[in-house]
Image: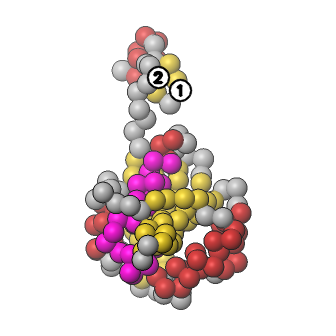
């Protein structure tokens, strides 16, 4: 069982999040400190940290930036420091995003990934994400991305779907 925990990032975590961006993303793909500072304080974004034990202390192993839309939760970025890869930090972050989307009533989780990176896209497919669009020249000329989506089915609770009562008249409309 993984000992990685997830917590909400605070403005004081900016140096750690910026260091993760620097180490994990090419300069053309990383967020600036200004953009990260905005993500940390925005009401429509959130930043989450994966915390992992290392040398007897807890260290920031990875970070995830989410954009909160009305119907979807968008994973803007997920990054795990190289020395922590393989310990479940990335998996915990993505599972946390999916759980958060479910708890807040979103119908899907979306993201973009480099079309050439089959290891990455296959990793997301392992969570149930499916490619539904190709974004030509997304990263640079000739560097296409895929837009992926995980559709979330509403859970049935007490005869309700998404808070709507299911009665005979509703069932008749559905047929």
Label 1 and label 2: CA atoms lie apart by 5 Å
In the picture, the disc for residue 34 is none
| Residue contact between numbered discs 1 and 2, judged by CB atoms under 8 Å | yes
User: What crowding class fits label 1: few (fewer than 14 Cα within 10 Å), some (14-19), or many (20 or more)?
Assistant: few
Q: Which residue is mark 2?
A: 160
Q: Where 62 falls versus 42 (above or below)? A: below
Seen at 44% across and 73% down, the residue is 56
**Residue 105 image offset from top left, x and y in percent:** 53, 40
Q: Residue furthest top?
A: 168
User: Magenta includes 91?
Assistant: yes
Tell me if residue 131 comes above or below residue 86 in the rendering. above
Quarter holding the C terminus? top left
Closer to us: 51 or 145: 51
Give the main secondary structure, helix, strand or loop, of the magenta stretch.
Answer: helix
- Report which quarter residue 33 is drawn in: bottom right
User: From the viewer's perspective, is 19 left or right of 14?
Assistant: left
Compared across the picture, whether 65 is left or right of 154 comes to right
In the image, what residue occupies the spot 69% across and 68% down?
11
- The furthest residue to the front: 56
Residue 174: x percent and y percent? Answer: 40, 22
- Colour scheme shown: secondary structure
Q: Position of residue 162 (x, y in %)?
A: 50, 30
SS under mark 1: loop
Q: Quadrant of the N terminus?
A: bottom left
- Which portion, as a residue range, is magenta? 76-100
Q: Front-most of 61 and 148? A: 61
Q: Residues within 10 Å of mark 2 (few under 14, many from 20)?
A: few
The picture places residue 85, in percent across and down from the top left corner, at 35, 75
Q: Which residue is mark 1?
A: 163
């Amino acid at each position: 069982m993984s000992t990685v925990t997830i917590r909400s990032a605070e403005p004081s975590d900016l140096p750690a999040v910026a260091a993760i961006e620097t180490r994990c993303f090419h300069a053309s793909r990383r967020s600036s400190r200004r953009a990260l500072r905005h993500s940390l304080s925005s009401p429509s974004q959130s930043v989450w940290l994966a915390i992992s034990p290392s040398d007897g202390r807890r260290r920031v192993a990875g970070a995830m930036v989410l954009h909160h839309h009305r119907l979807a939760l968008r994973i803007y970025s997920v990054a795990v420091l190289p020395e922590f890869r393989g310990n479940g930090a990335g998996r915990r972050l993505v599972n946390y995003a999916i759980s958060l989307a479910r708890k807040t009533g979103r119908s899907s989780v979306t993201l973009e990934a480099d079309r050439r990176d089959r290891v990455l896209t296959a990793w997301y497919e392992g969570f149930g994400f499916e490619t539904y669009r190709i974004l030509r020249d997304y990263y640079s000329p000739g560097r296409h991305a895929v837009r992926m989506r995980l559709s979330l089915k509403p859970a049935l609770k007490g005869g309700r779907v998404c808070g709507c009562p299911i009665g005979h008249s509703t069932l008749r409309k559905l047929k």
